[in-house]
Image (cartoon, helix red, strand yellow):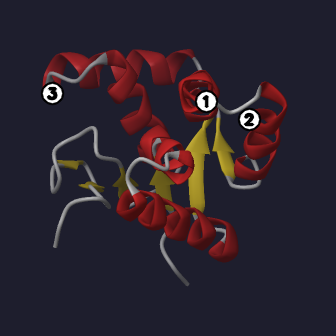
Amino acid sequence: MTAPFFVDTNVFVYADDRSDPRKQAIARDLIRRALRERTGKVSLQVLQEFFSATRKLGIEPVAAKRRIEIFARLDVVRLDVDDVQAAIDLHRLHDLSIWDALIVRAALISGCRTLFTEDLQHGRRFEGLEIVDPFRPA
């Protein structure tokens, strides 16, 4: 069985961003894998951030809503107050923005070993979670 992995907002954004075909292809492949293997996880925050970014991408709200319905087929992680408190500790201890700390926390509590994002340092680790930039040149 494949280990669960967490998908950050930028992966979903690049899947719709035609300005960089290489990143778009990588993002689409990762999303297909997440849906096919049923091992991908996201948080409500990721879905909200994606919707916020769709305006800049020129995606109509109805189409953005449909994409979110598809992405919500992944395991959606919901944080509670204790998780927000833990994210604040990640923010303090690791010099993360609170938004990145919330993403890391969601990935950790969902049992993921990998967080796919370009927003954090590739190879960095938080407990058993490794940051992987899927867009990083090989």
- How far apart marks 1 and 2 lie (CA) works out to 7 Å
Label 1 Cα neighbours within 10 Å, binned few <14 / some 14-19 / many ≥20: some
Measured as percent of width and height from the top left, residue 49 is found at 55, 26
Q: Say which residue label 2 marks.
A: 64
Residue at 16 percent of width and 44 percent of height = 121
Amino acid type at circle 2 is Ala
Separation of marks 3 and 2 at Cα, in angstroms: 33 Å
8 left or right of 65 in image:
left
User: Are the residues flagged by discs 1 and 2 in contact, CB closer than 8 Å?
Assistant: yes
Q: Is residue 83 above or below residue 1?
A: above
Q: Amino acid at mark 3?
A: His
Q: Is residue 108 left or right of residue 49?
A: left
**23 lies above or below 11:** below
Q: Which residue is mark 3?
A: 94
Q: Which element is circle 3 on? A: helix
| Quadrant where the image shows the N terminus | bottom right
The one nearer the camera, 110 or 42, is 42
Q: Which residue is mark 1?
A: 54
- Mark 3, other Cα within 10 Å: few <14 / some 14–19 / many ≥20: few
Residue at image coords 15%, 27%:
94
**Residue furthest to the bottom:** 1
Q: Amino acid at mark 1?
A: Thr
Query: Residue 48, how many percent across, how many down?
Result: 62, 25
Mark 3–mark 1 Cα distance, whole angstroms, equals 30 Å
Question: Is 117 in front, or is 98?
Answer: 117
How far from the left and from the top, in percent, is residue 59? Answer: 68, 33
- Tell me, yes or no, if residue 111 can be seen here: no
